[in-house]
């Protein structure tokens, strides 16, 4: 499922109209009808929930429309709802009827000819706003068609005041709000909210998802999002060269299918194993992690790899903590690394990790290692001399700030792109930017790191993003309960576990972030947000893999 910027969406629309000859008013008609159908569905569902108090479908709809094409969609919605028996009031905001142009004007005129009441709100005069409040006082449904995907910056008056009234009505009277394309006040490209914003119950977006609908805080304002098929030619979409897409189950199940004649990665990772296999068939992961006080990071990463399906896992950790790490791990092996006497690796560990890497299929390094010069030497040695894929996280990233040329050596040495899994703060250090700058442009940040460092970059957080430098993949699984210690360590292990089984670094990262989030969602159903721990998530990795594979062995209590 592709995710477009406002400019890319404009290109798609323009190509559909100018190259393929689809009239813009036909696209507007399809858009408006899609929204109207969602409104009908929403009100029916809402009424079912309160059927013990009142029967039938609510019939009062207030449509807020701007002067542009988004407002034109709103006038189409008004017409359909009117024809379906709703009492409809259309409120033109930010101008007068004679200022509306093009296809939007045609649909406005149709509404007027049909006798629909059109209230003009060109300014935020108190008397005018009182009329809007009166209309909202009896509304059962609100449609937001004020601002489109091209809108930038904080909404100006009178739109700002109207948004405030919409939110007040929705909050106090529990009136559902359906946004057309995206909630007014959300930036379509980065999800930022510079001023007032409509807090939608549902958003019906046209043709393709928009970045602002999946990136926070815009995603929160959007509510539930539906992508409406308005008959845009797929050739028009392809011509826009959209580089961002959502990680979906269908996409993951097809990973690697037919590529170079090999069996699909998803078949090897997600579906039942062949009978004539053994532990060596599913790869050997080396986890280099842990230091005194941070043994949990090593054990969580190891368990993440095991739960992902790796056949063997070995943990290389400072000698001073080996016994403690080993006592926490029943199924994994451990090897000691030279330490400095304080439970941290010493410079000699740089050669020792290369010895430990012999015979391994993938190396996960960084969780809980510490931020010392010795750790940098370990990471540098692996980047320059390891012959297998690397997954670098946590402290392994902290010592690499501004060292893209060093990271590039890994791809040159091993033939595999290393996987880097920073949170926003770590990403900032890698790119030598502030955390705020990273968060303000998450897609740009993850793509820049992947491109400049020749790696697969995984930018963690709400809506984790993955990039190989060419494409950007957005993950929609996961929940706020996962904002706790150890979650990233589990993810590191899971990615390594999938790579051990034959996934490429990019495929392993995509499978890892999706299934990690899905396991968190399954665990949430049992623990709630506040009590959710990384160990709870580990217990749900297996059910998550079953769910993604389409297996029927999940019990009702394990369903999301």
Image: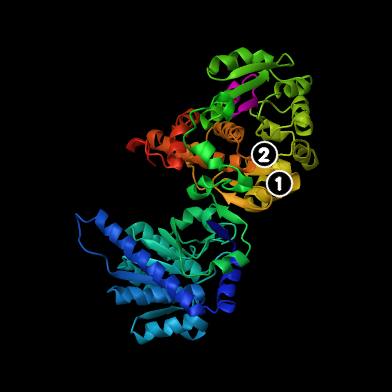
Q: Is 196 above or below relative to 91?
A: above
- Residue 332 screen position, x and y as percent: 57, 20
| Residue 420 vertical placement versus 87 (above, below) | above
Q: CA distance from mark 2 to mark 1?
A: 9 Å
Q: Mark 1 highlights which residue?
A: 449
What quarter of the picture does the C terminus occupy? Answer: top left
The local crowd at label 1, few if under 14, some if 14 to 19, many if 20 or more residues have their Cα within 10 Å, is many
Question: Based on the displayed image, in which of its 4 quarters is residue 384 positioned?
Answer: top right
- The answer to which of marks 2 and 1 sits earlier in the sequence is 2
**Quadrant of residue 200 in the image?**
bottom left
Q: What's drawn in magenta, residue-wise?
A: 283-298
Asked if residue 295 is among those painted magenta in the image, a careful observer would answer yes
Q: Circle 1 sits in a helix, a strand or a loop, which is it?
A: helix
Residue 126 in sight here: no
From what the image shows, is residue 341 above or below residue 255? above
Residue 12, horizontal then vertical, whole percent: 58, 69
Question: From where the camera sits, is residue 183 visible?
Answer: yes
Q: Quadrant of residue 312?
A: top right
Residue 238 x, y percent position in the rendering: 60, 64
* Label disc, if present, on residue 420 of the rendered structure: 2
Does the magenta portion include 25? no
What residue appears at the point 61 percent right and 12 percent down from the top-left corner?
323
Q: Which mark is residue 402?
A: none
Rendered residue at 53%/30% (across/down): 309
Q: SS for tag 2?
A: strand
Left or right side of 555 for 108 = right
Judge left or right: residue 320 versus residue 104. right
Which residue is pictured at 50% across the width and 67% down the height? 160
Q: Residues within 10 Å of mark 2 (few under 14, many from 20)?
A: many
- CB under 8 Å between discs 2 and 1: yes
């Amino acid at each position: 499922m592709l995710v477009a910027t406002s400019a890319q969406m404009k290109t798609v629309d323009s190509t559909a109209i100018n190259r393929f000859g689809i009239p813009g008013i036909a696209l507007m008609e399809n858009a408006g009808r899609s929204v109207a159908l969602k409104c009908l569905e929403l009100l029916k569902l809402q009424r079912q929930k309160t059927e013990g108090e009142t029967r039938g479908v609510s019939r009062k709809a207030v449509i807020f429309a701007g002067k542009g094409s988004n407002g034109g969609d709103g006038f189409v919605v008004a017409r359909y709802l009117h024809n379906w028996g709703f009492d409809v009031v259309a409120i033109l905001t930010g101008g007068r009827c004679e200022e509306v142009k093009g296809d939007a004007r045609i649909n406005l005129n149709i509404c007027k000819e049909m006798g629909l009441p059109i209230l003009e709100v060109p300014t935020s005069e108190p008397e005018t706003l009182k009329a809007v409040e009166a209309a909202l006082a009896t509304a059962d449904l609100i449609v937001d068609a004020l601002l489109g995907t091209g809108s930038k910056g904080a909404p100006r008056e009178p739109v700002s005041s109207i948004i405030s009234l919409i939110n007040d009505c929705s909050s106090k009277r529990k009136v559902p709000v359906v946004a057309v394309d995206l909630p007014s006040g959300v930036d379509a490209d980065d999800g930022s909210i510079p001023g007032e914003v409509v807090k939608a119950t549902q958003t019906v977006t046209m043709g393709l998802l928009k970045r602002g609908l999946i990136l926070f805080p815009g995603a929160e304002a959007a509510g539930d999002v539906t992508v409406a098929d308005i008959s845009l030619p797929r050739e028009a979409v392809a011509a826009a060269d959209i580089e961002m897409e959502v990680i979906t189950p269908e996409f993951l199940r097809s990973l690697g299918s037919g590529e170079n004649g090999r069996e699909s990665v998803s078949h090897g990772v997600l579906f039942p194993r062949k009978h004539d296999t053994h532990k060596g068939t599913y790869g050997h992961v080396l986890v280099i992690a842990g230091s005194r006080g941070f043994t949990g990071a090593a054990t969580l990463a190891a368990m993440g790899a095991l739960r992902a399906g790796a056949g063997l896992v070995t943990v290389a950790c400072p000698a001073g903590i080996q016994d403690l790490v080993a006592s926490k791990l029943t199924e994994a092996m451990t090897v000691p690394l030279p330490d400095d006497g304080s439970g941290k690796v010493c410079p000699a560990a740089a050669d020792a990790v290369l010895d430990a890497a012999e015979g391994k299929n993938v190396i996960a390094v960084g969780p809980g290692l510490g931020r010392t010069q010795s750790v940098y030497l370990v990471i540098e040695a692996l980047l320059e001399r390891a012959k297998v894929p690397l997954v670098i996280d946590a402290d392994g990233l902290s010592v690499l700030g501004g060292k893209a040329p060093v990271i590039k050596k890994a791809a040159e040495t091993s033939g595999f792109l290393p996987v880097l899994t920073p949170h926003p703060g770590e990403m900032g250090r890698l790119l030598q930017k502030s955390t705020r700058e990273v968060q303000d442009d998450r897609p740009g940040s993850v793509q820049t790191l992947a491109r400049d460092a020749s790696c697969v970059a995984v930018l963690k957080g709400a809506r984790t993003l993955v990039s190989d430098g060419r494409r950007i993949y957005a993950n929609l699984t996961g929940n706020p309960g996962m904002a706790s210690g150890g979650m990233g360590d589990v993810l590191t292990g899971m990615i390594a576990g999938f790579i051990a089984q034959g996934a490429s670094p990019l495929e392993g990262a995509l499978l890892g972030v999706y299934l990690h989030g899905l396991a968190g969602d399954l665990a949430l159903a049992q623990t709630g947000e506040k009590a959710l721990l990384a160990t709870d998530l580990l217990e749900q990795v297996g059910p998550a893999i079953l769910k993604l594979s389409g297996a029927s062995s999940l019990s009702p209590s394990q369903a999301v």
